[in-house]
Each structure stands twice: as C-alpha cells, then as structure tokens.
Image (cartoon, coloured by chain):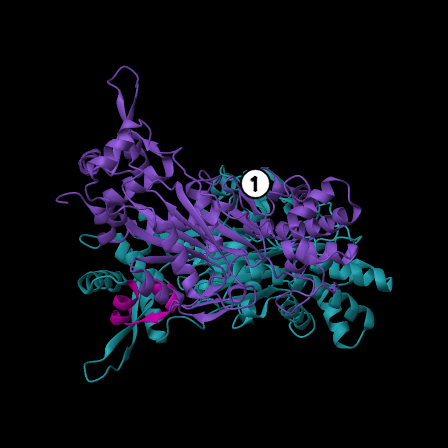
Chain colours: A cyan, B purple
Amino acid sequence: MPKVANQWLQEILRLLYIRRTATRSDVIETTGLNPASVSQALRLLLDCGTVLKVGEKQSNGGRPSDVLSLNPEAGYFAAVDLEGRRIRFALSNFVGDIRCRWEEDFEQGRPLPVEKITNGVSRVLEDLDDDQRSRLVALGVSYPGFLDPEGRLTAFNLGWHRFPFLTKLREALNIPVFAEHDKHSCVLAERWLGSAQNYRHGLFVIVERGIGIGVFLDGKAVDGWRGMVGELGHCTVEPDATDLCACGRRGCVESIASSGSIVRQYCERTGETKEQLRVTDVFERARRGDEAAKAVLDRAGKALGRALSYAIQFLDPEIVIFGGNLIPGEDVLLPIVKAEIARCTLPEVLAGVKMTVSSLGLDIRLKGAVSMAFRTSLRNPQLLDQMCAPVLNGHKSSSQRAGHPGRNEEVPLPVQPSDGG
Amino acid sequence: MPKVANQWLQEILRLLYIRRTATRSDVIETTGLNPASVSQALRLLLDCGTVLKVGEKQSNGGRPSDVLSLNPEAGYFAAVDLEGRRIRFALSNFVGDIRCRWEEDFEQGRPLPVEKITNGVSRVLEDLDDDQRSRLVALGVSYPGFLDPEGRLTAFNLGWHRFPFLTKLREALNIPVFAEHDKHSCVLAERWLGSAQNYRHGLFVIVERGIGIGVFLDGKAVDGWRGMVGELGHCTVEPDATDLCACGRRGCVESIASSGSIVRQYCERTGETKEQLRVTDVFERARRGDEAAKAVLDRAGKALGRALSYAIQFLDPEIVIFGGNLIPGEDVLLPIVKAEIARCTLPEVLAGVKMTVSSLGLDIRLKGAVSMAFRTSLRNPQLLDQMCAPVLNGHKSSSQRAGHPGRNEEVPLPVQPSDGG
C-alpha cells in the first residue's frame, strides 16, 4: 500500500464501522485527517472493495457526494461470550452484523472444557466457503472474571483458576484471538453500536448471574489498578442481611439482586423449587400481582438502586445504560431501581443524567467482542493488510447488487431458547 | 530563549518541583527528552538562576554528576484555601515551601465579601520586597462547590451562588488567578508532594465540614461529566435515619460523619451545646473512654467506612489517602472506618490496597493550589518566561551560600489556632 499510511486506513475503517455510512467530507471532518490523505486512502479502499459506494448525497449547489460504507463481506469475525448459563458463539460480517449464532451448554460446577469453545467456534465457521474463510480476521472473546498478564483466566462460574485459555484457543483454532472483559465488551458495543455513541461519560449496568458496571470516562473504558473497576455486585448494601453470597460474605448486592438471588428468594417465600424457575418467571408473576414476586423484586430493586446511586455520585456519568435482566424486567424491576436511585442521589448530580435500557439485547457481548476484535485487528499491520486485501468479485458484486450494505442480511439460526436468568 | 523549546523547560521544571533534586541523567531518563535538548535547557536554567547546582553525586567510575534543584527564590506563588471555617492564605516560594500564612475569619451564613480574599492575599505578599514581588507568578485558589464555565462559583458554605469570583479577584489583584476544586487540589498536592507520588490510581478522602473524595485514575485527576466525581458525602448510607443533611435529605454520609455531624450527635446525646465543642474534643473524650463519644464515632466511622467500601469497589484504587479530620482522629475514628471497609469490600479488591494518612496536614489545599498554579503557569508562555527570567544575584547567592535549596526555610507566622472541625 504505497503512500497510504496505516493510520489513515485505521481511522477511516473505524469511522465507517461506527457510523455505518459517511461521505468523504464526513471522514475529513470527523478524523481531522487532511483531505489529500483521505482521498488517497479512500481510493485504495474502494479499489480493493473493502469500502463500497452505496449511494449519493445531494449537497448544497455542488455535485452530489458519494455515500460510502464498509463492504459487509470484506471480512469476518468470530465471537464468544463466556458469561451466562450457556456459552454463546457468533459469526459476524465486516459491519458487525451477526450472521450466525450457536450456543453450547456447559455443566454448572465443573470446569468448562476448552473443546466446548473450539467446537462452538468451528460450528459458526462451518458455512463459510474457502474464500470467505480466508477473510476470517480474528476471534473476539468476552470473558468474566480476571485475566492475568500471562493470559490465564480465573472465572469461578467457568470453574477456571488461572486457566491458560488464550494459549489453548490460539493453539486449537489457528486464528488471532483477542479477549476483553465482559464489562468492557458491553461498553464497547454501546459506544460503537448502541445508546452510548454520543456520550463521553457513562455506566453500563449488567444484572445477570453476576452484577457489575462497565465504566467509561472521557470516552475511554476505565480499568482501575487491577481491572476491577465497577465491582458493584459485592457492595454490602444490607449489612445485617443473612443472604449468603457466592463470595462467602452476606448482604452483597449480588446476594439480593442477581437473577439467581431473585429466584432463590422467591422460592424461599413460596416453597417452589429453584430448578423450575427463571427470573423472567418471577417478573411474569409480579406482573400478575403475585405478592411474593413483588416483594422480592422490591427488595432487589432497592438494593440495586441504592448501590447504583453510589456509583452515580462517585462517577458523575451523563448516561446510565441498563442491560442484562433489567431488559426483560423493564416494567417490573427497573422502576423500583430508578425510584431508589432518585431517593438516594443528590439531585444536583442526578439532574440531566439520561437513563436508558440497552437496545443490543442478548447479543451485546458478542457484538462487543466483535467490535473489540475489529478495533484490535486494525492496529495489527498484518491483519489490517488482510482487511484491505482485494475482495473477490463474486462477493463484492453480490452486495452491490443488493443495493444495500447488508444491514438487514442477518440470518439468525434457530438456537436453543436463551436463559433469562 | 533561542533554540530551547518551552516543552523542555516545562518538563524539567515540573520534574524538579516534584523530585526536589535531580541529576542531568535523572532528567533524561524521566522526561524521555533527548540528551542534547536537556543540556541546552539546563544551561539556560542554570544561567538565569532558576535552577541551582546544590551538590554532586558520585557515579560508578565516571566523574561526579551535578545535583540540581530549583532556586527557591526564583518565583513566588500566593494561594487561597476557601474550605474550612476560616479562609486560609499562603505565600509559597518556587519549590512549594510555604513562607508565610494568614487566616481570615468569615461570618457563617452570610456571603463572603471578596475583600476578605484580596485583603488576605495582600497580607501574605506584604513582606516581599520589590524585586521579589516582581517574581510573583500567580495566585492559586482551592475552592469548594461548583465553578461554571464562565468562572462563577456556587458554594453554599461561602454563601455564593454563581458569584463571579475569578473575575473579581483578577480585577482586584492584577495577577493571574488559577482555580482548582478542592478535591483536585488535594489530589495534586498528594501526587506532587505527598503519599501518592508513585501511584497511578488512588482516592483522597476528605472529611471536614463536607465529605468528598478526590479521584485519580491512570495518573490523572478524574472529573466526570460535570466535575462531580467523588460526591461521597451525599450517599445515603442509612436510608431510615432521621439525621437531616444540609442538602435537605436524610441519612447521607455527611449527616452522620462530617465534623459538624459528629459534634451535633455528641451534643444530642449529652445535652452540651454545640458552640463549645470541636470534633477534636469529641476525639479526646473518646480517648478518655467517654461512652457517648465512642458511640458517635462508631456510627460515623461505620457510615464513612461503608461508603468508602463502595468507592473502592467501583474505582479499584491502589492507594487510599485519608485527610481532613481523619488525621487528628487517626487513633479513634480511622480504625472504625478501616474495619468497616474491610467488612464491606470484596477481599480480592481490597488486597494490597495501601491506606495511609495524609502527611501534608492542614496545608494540603494551599500546597495543592500552589502546585496547580505552578503547573498551570508552566503552560503559559509569558509566565514561563517570567519563571526563567534572570534571578538577581542577591537572592541567587544567598541560597547558594546556604548550601541548601531552602527546604527548611519555612517561616511559619503565628496564626490563629486552626479549626479541627
């Protein structure tokens, strides 16, 4: 790629990924690159088919500007989401649309065999033909727990203690593997594709088996000293409570407001057995006026709301995005959370803070993992070259014929029903 | 200053301010500047007398290296601290040593007249001779409350609502005025002169009339969306408490653990009148076994400790520095705070976190304001020129004769006894 600096390509591809479409002037204005550099880089990207012209935009008086977009078939990313009761897999095209999903069960309480992951990844790659497979750029993994500098993961839910999963995956799969903590992958998905695109300071709240917040300040995900920023789940909100948490302590937010804790408390009140119930069942019963369900959600919502009021007062966000089980519980759990936030937060701090439910749904961590893999691959000269290699005519023209950059081409596979809790 | 870039001067002066002394090799290693640039800049700084040679350091085999230091008399900074029950003023020399202090009372509950500030500043400048006064660089102000983008301050304790104090001060004093929120001035003082010098992620906890935390992450003070990061004081830690807070709500940390709240609770228990008591008196009585004092401190310490446990879990600091009244209460209040932090924080997050009491004492905000004024002045080309203007021989040689860069030359003026609460 003579004369075209990698930095120009990186910035243009990154912008098109986030914005979906842009004109040459948009690129110049947003990246701050000089117009000649942008023209040179765009020429290369259009020539190789990584970028497509998808329309024209009338400008005032002058000739219309080309509207540009990434070629959805210019590259593929695989993704794994290790949070949740099943391991989720996806294949994404070059614009972040998920083209294929897969899920694998794993046995709670026993270490997850790494083959489960390699099998799942192979499964979502199955339908790629040879040419498409040659355009597979990388695998992005969204993980819970703590990854040490040697790439060993400690995650209680997966039964892994310093398990060298990055090494294992790279050996088994023979593609670049990039990993990101699930707090960050949610933030990245929201920043690139979701509600947080125009915000610089925010919190993403995840309530599932665990409870945590992803934090971004000044437009950047925040890590803290040891990557443990946002450990909201183990804040003691009811110091005198008897609820035992997985961490061995009592009265943590997680022991009261996680999906499992909501189900457990409901069963304690009603005598039902946990195995039959999901948190979404408790939501449904509360909707129908079940007093036990309402009482459990009241307690859970208040515990979570209080902890979030602290987070808001400490971190001064402009947006708070609710994800995980706050999405299906938007009508029965979230209002309690918000009321408690309002009660426990200084009005001057809360005024103007936008609160919204994530629009990315269960795919959020998969989309975050893909965004992360895309972004990380841009910074790797070899992978950037691969992303800018000429796209075969077949794929290029099929997209162009469709007259659309592939936004609606998602082909959801039938998957097992996903766990609400 | 031909050929010597401002950036080189800035980095060298900044390093010498923080490190006190350094050799040429230290400068090269720490700043990453190239050796030729460092030599040129040091030659200029030594020629003008802004930097002095204060000793030699034997190196392995080679010839000894000059040990360099800022000339304490190369410039002066005034500082104002608007927190506390009195307004505090200081004059600092070029190395951050306070040479002169002053305090002004102000009437609680009435707006602070701006003349109180200008009078106080004039008072600390009184003993400077004409030459010294020409080397007065700037005034640094450490303020509580909220400063809007137009420089108007809202601070309930000072009785100011959108008061244009920066404009007023600049008009009245005719020197550059730089202002910093007191949370940040504490962080800056600790980062430049105190316990936080070698840490990148930390919290500075202030407990006085108000309660707040200054936050730095990745080596930088954190602001959040509207500069309200660290609003710990108004976290609701006892939702059912009746204690009324200045913010109008109940059960805030501040309504239980601030100096005034500790005194109030003690008086409520004993029937004494508030006017006669300071928080340090309550500490003293607890030391002597007074049950009422011990009970009040137990409640205050737990409320504060619990709120801090949240801050630690959200922000993942490597150091927590306690300031304000936690210093005189180090033996009777702080242990309760620490025990509650330990009880309410996930052990994995707390492990290895260093906790320490600020060593900068009551001067912390004055020292922070001076550090901030120094740092801000470095970035102003005109003020940087002033800081590098030739120092008159008299002052230069007096420092050199003393054979010491002035560390022990602090001349504390007799001041009114300072308020513990």
| Residue at numbered disc 1 | B357
Q: What amino acid is labelled 1 in the image?
A: Val
Along the viewing direction, whichever of A359 and B73 lies nearer the viewer: B73
Determine whether B203 is above or below B164 in the image. above
- The magenta region covers A15-31
Left or right of B332: which side holds B388?
left
- Does residue B289 show up? yes
Q: Residue furthest bottom?
A: A61
| Other residues around mark 1 within 10 Å, as few (<14) / some (14–19) / many (≥20) | some
Determine whether B406 is above or below B121 in the image. above
Assess whether residue B210 is covered by the magenta stretch.
no
Q: Position of residue A350 (x, y in %)?
A: 56, 69
Q: Position of residue A195 (x, y in %)?
A: 49, 69
Left or right of B106: which side holds A131?
left
Q: Position of residue A2 (x, y in %)?
A: 18, 52
Assess whether residue A29 is covered by the magenta stretch.
yes
Along the viewing direction, whichever of A406 and B172 lies nearer the viewer: B172
Along the viewing direction, whichever of B147 and A162 lies nearer the viewer: B147
The subunit carrying tag 1 is B
Q: Position of residue B131 (x, y in %)?
A: 23, 45
Q: Quadrant of residue B333?
A: top right
At horizontal 49% and vertical 41% (from top left) the residue drawn is: B360
